[in-house]
Image (cartoon, rainbow, N blue to C red):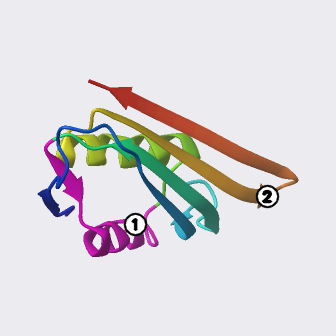
Amino acid sequence: MLETFPNPKRERNYHIAFDCPEFTCLCPKTGQPDFATILIDYVPDETCVELKSLKLYLWSYRDEGAFHEAVTNKICDDIVAAVAPRSITVTGKFWVRGGITTTVTATATK
């Protein structure tokens, strides 16, 4: 569950960026771990995401099977549901598997 706190500067557009280089989920086909860096950049509106809850939320994927496209979009959707940002971009940069890297970018705006 993502916790929030009031935006301390609601009248201003500013970016909050998180770089999460230790993201892990499981490949839904093989069950092997997939490693990624998740980049989150958003412009808050009324509330902001609390950092510890974000860390625990991202850790919750460690034992969950998910395609790269699905997990990146779900992270974006869950943050939008929690804080309704003015805009958000979530990028999943997944490490090499079978000689291929995958980068998925999901965006949302009000």
Q: Position of residue 30 (x, y in %)?
A: 64, 61
- Residue visible at 60% across and 40% down? 104
- Residue visible at 44% across and 31% down? 107
Q: Secondary structure at mark 1?
A: helix
Q: Against 39, is 102 above or below?
A: above
Q: Which residue is mark 2?
A: 96
Find the distance from the CA under tag 2 to the CA under tag 1.
20 Å
Visible residue check, residue 68: yes
Please state which amino acid type lies under the numbered disc 2. Val
Q: Which residue is mark 1?
A: 58
Q: Quadrant of residue 32?
A: bottom right
Please identify the quadrant where the C terminus is shown.
top left
Residue stretch in magenta: 46-64
- Residue visible at 21% across and 61% down? 2
Q: Nearer the viewer, residue 85 or 32?
A: 85
Please identify the quadrant where the N terminus is shown.
bottom left
